[in-house]
Image (tube, rainbow, N blue to C red):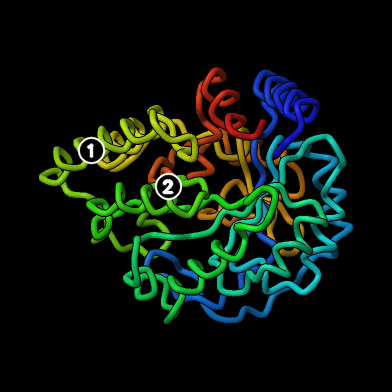
Amino acid sequence: MTSVKRTISLAKRGIRNYFSRRPFCVSFEVTYSCNAHCKHCHLGGPVDEQRAAPERYGELCREIQPVVAQISGGEPLLRRDLEQIIKAIRIPNKAPYIVVTTNGTLLTKERYQRLREAGVDEFSLSLDYPDERHDEFRGVPGLFKRIEKLVNELDSEPHKAITLSCVVQRDNFRDLLQTAMLAQRWNVRINFSTYTWLRTNNKDYMLSQKELPEFKQIVKQLLDFKKKHKNFFASEYVFKRMIKFFEQGSIPNCRAGERFFIVNPDGALSPCGLILRKYKTQMEIKRDFMSTNTCGYCNTSIRANSEKPIKYLILDNLSGHL
């Protein structure tokens, strides 16, 4: 668990970054290669790419000073130097809070322990269904059982630093409560993110207007479940915003480049993972991108959680870490 001292340090940086218009979360997308073929994603397979050295990611993190450093991809565990990347980014007892986002295919108990020792605070592990349907959606046979085996093996760990990440879409929204209940049985946390069609240009997974009344009832059930169980991360604010996104098809006033942005595998900066224009500094992003940005066609987890009002930004993101 995060110490009280470090939690206070994270909260202070969050407040400072909010009012100084610095990012809350930066996603270090350390590779675009991926060993899965997810239906909701444009990535999949090996990518010939230029990759920055671990030290460069560390330098960038110290320049940017985010509250949360998300290590993602692609599949970040494909990088054999991932432990070195974590060590380069980590500052003992201070920000950033380090989260590794993974599909779970390469995460073993031994790798989990090595990465925790290197400085990982939390693993965000994708799980979109409470059963083997997850395998088909992610394009990896046997993946659900592999994840189940891993979380059971981690029962012996003093703190199981796993949060399941579920992408809410048309084919799985009726299973969300069952997925949350599964997370409770596994003694891990759960978070929910909104499907976006921008990655694949496929709107088939967007909830229809006819399905929204049923979805709202399911959200009510989820929030009732949240009141009884501490393992539930997504807040009422996030779910209200998710409903609004499915109702309208967009959320205006995107703050990409300010509240959050991306570090590409080569170390260049981009405003988000869906608009891969490259910049050298955050100042360039603010000057050349934010002034003309009219996109609002996603509500991904990094955006939804980084664009919260200050009250929810601090309380929601730091709750459960003490």
Instruction: Indicate the position of residue 318 as horizontal and vertical percent values.
Output: 62, 30
Q: Secondary structure at mark 1?
A: helix
Q: Secondary structure at mark 2?
A: strand
Residue 285 vertical position relative to residue 308 in the rendered view, above or below: below
- Residue 241 figure quarter: top left
* Residue on which the image places disc 2: 193
Q: Judge from the rendering whether residue 284 lies leftward or rightward of residue 182; answer left or right.
A: right
Nearer the observer, disc 2 or disc 1?
Answer: 2
Count the marks: how many? 2
98 relative to 113, above or below: above
Q: Amino acid at mark 2?
A: Ser
Quadrant location, the C terminus: top right
Residue name at image x 46 percent, y 68 percent: 42
Residue 166 falls left or right of residue 112: left
Quadrant assignment for the N terminus: top right
Name which quarter of the figure residue 109 lies in.
bottom right
The label on residue 247 is 1
As rendered, which of 185 and 203 lies closer to the eye?
Answer: 185
Point out the residue furthest to the front here. 156
308 to the left or right of 283: left
Q: CA distance from mark 2 to mark 1?
A: 16 Å
- Residue 66 location, x and y as percent? 73, 37
Residue 18: image location, x then y, percent: 65, 23
Say which of 297 and 304 sits in front.
304
> At x 54% / y 43%, what residue is drawn?
302
Q: Earlier in the sequence, mark 2 or mark 1?
A: 2
Amino acid found under the numbered disc labelled 1: Glu
Image coordinates for residue 28, horizontal then vertical, percent: 69, 54
Q: Nearer the viewer, residue 288 or 251?
A: 251
Instruction: Tell me which residue sits at (58%, 63%) in the image.
Output: 102
